[in-house]
C-alpha cells in the first residue's frame, strides 16, 4: 500500500503525512522499517487492519508489563497473564471474559490515578475482540508512565515483534471508505 493511500484511509495528521511523504519512500512496508517518531510508529501499528489481533494483544500486554509495579491488585496482573495466554492459544474465551470482569472490578475509580490507569490498561489487554480494540491498553500504559524512554521502548518492541499487513485488509477498508462496497 502506498504511503499516501494509508494516510488517506486513516486520516493521518498533517505533520505525519508530510514527513512520511518527504522520506521519498513509496510504500508503507518501506516506511515501517525507517526510523521515525515513536508515537507515529505506534499510531501506524494501531490502525485497524495493520496488525493481527494476537500481535496487538501481546503488544498491549507488553505495555502493561512496563508498568507492572503499578498493578497492586492481583486481579489486574492475572488479567494480563490470561490475555497473553489467550493470544498464544492457551486460554479460553471464557477464561478471558472472567479475567476481564475481575480486572474491571479492580480498576475502581477510587484508586490513585496512576494505579487506576494501569488497572484499566490490564482490563483493556483482555478486552481486545479485534485488532484495534487492543490499542487502549497501549495508550493507557503509556499514560501511566509517559516518558520519552517508554515511548521509544514501545516503538522498539513494535519494530522487533510485529509484522504489519499493509495490503489486503487495508485495501478493503479503502473500498469501504470510498463507498465501493
Image (tube, rainbow, N blue to C red):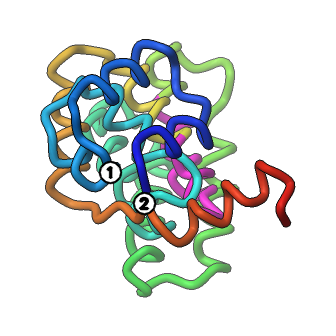
Secondary element at tag 2: loop
Tell me residue 100's x, y (percent): 63, 57
Residue at (28%, 55%) from the top-left corner?
A: 29
Q: Mark 2 packing: few (<14 Cα in 10 Å), some, or many (20+)? A: many
Q: From the viewer's perspective, is 125 left or right of 28?
A: right
Question: At 47% from the left edge and 38% from the top edge, which residue is drawn?
Answer: 4
118, 15: nearer the viewer = 15
Can you tell which quarter of the image residue 16 is in? top left
| Of callouts 2 and 1, the N-terminal one | 1
Helix, strand or loop at label 1? It is loop
From the image, state whether disc 2 or disc 1 is nearer to you: 1
Pick the residue in front: 155 or 9.
9
Q: Residue 137, how many percent across, how many down?
A: 49, 41
Rendered image quadrant of residue 160:
bottom left
Considering the image in quadrants, where does the C terminus appear? bottom right
* SS assignment for the magenta stretch, majority: helix
Disc sitting over residue 27 in the figure: 1
Q: Is residue 166 above or below residue 64?
A: below
The residue to which callout 2 is attached is 166
Q: Which residues are magenta?
A: 118-135
Please state if 58 lies on the left or on the right of 147 as rendered: right
* Proximity of marks 2 and 1: CB atoms separated by less than 8 Å: yes
Q: CA distance from mark 2 to mark 1?
A: 9 Å
The residue drawn where x is 77% and y is 49% is 177
Q: Position of residue 178 (x, y in %)?
A: 79, 50
Amino acid at each position: 500500500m502506498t504511503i499516501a493511500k494509508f494516510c488517506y484511509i486513516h486520516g493521518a495528521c498533517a505533520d505525519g503525512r508530510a514527513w512520511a511523504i518527504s522520506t521519498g519512500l513509496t510504500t508503507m512496508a518501506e516506511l515501517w522499517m525507517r526510523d521515525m517518531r515513536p508515537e507515529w510508529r505506534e499510531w501506524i501499528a494501531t490502525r485497524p487492519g495493520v496488525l493481527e489481533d494476537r500481535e496487538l494483544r501481546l503488544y498491549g500486554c507488553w505495555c502493561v508489563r512496563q508498568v507492572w509495579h503499578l498493578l497492586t491488585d492481583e486481579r489486574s496482573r492475572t488479567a494480563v497473564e490470561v490475555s497473553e495466554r489467550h493470544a498464544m492459544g492457551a486460554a479460553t474465551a471464557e477464561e478471558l471474559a472472567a479475567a476481564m470482569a475481575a480486572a474491571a472490578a479492580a480498576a475502581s475509580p477510587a484508586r490513585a490515578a496512576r494505579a487506576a490507569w494501569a488497572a484499566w490498561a490490564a482490563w483493556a489487554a483482555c478486552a481486545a475482540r479485534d485488532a484495534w480494540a487492543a490499542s487502549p491498553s497501549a495508550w493507557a500504559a503509556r499514560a501511566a508512565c509517559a516518558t520519552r524512554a517508554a515511548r521509544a521502548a514501545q516503538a522498539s518492541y513494535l519494530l522487533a515483534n510485529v509484522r504489519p499487513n499493509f495490503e489486503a485488509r487495508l485495501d478493503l477498508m479503502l473500498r469501504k471508505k470510498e463507498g465501493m462496497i
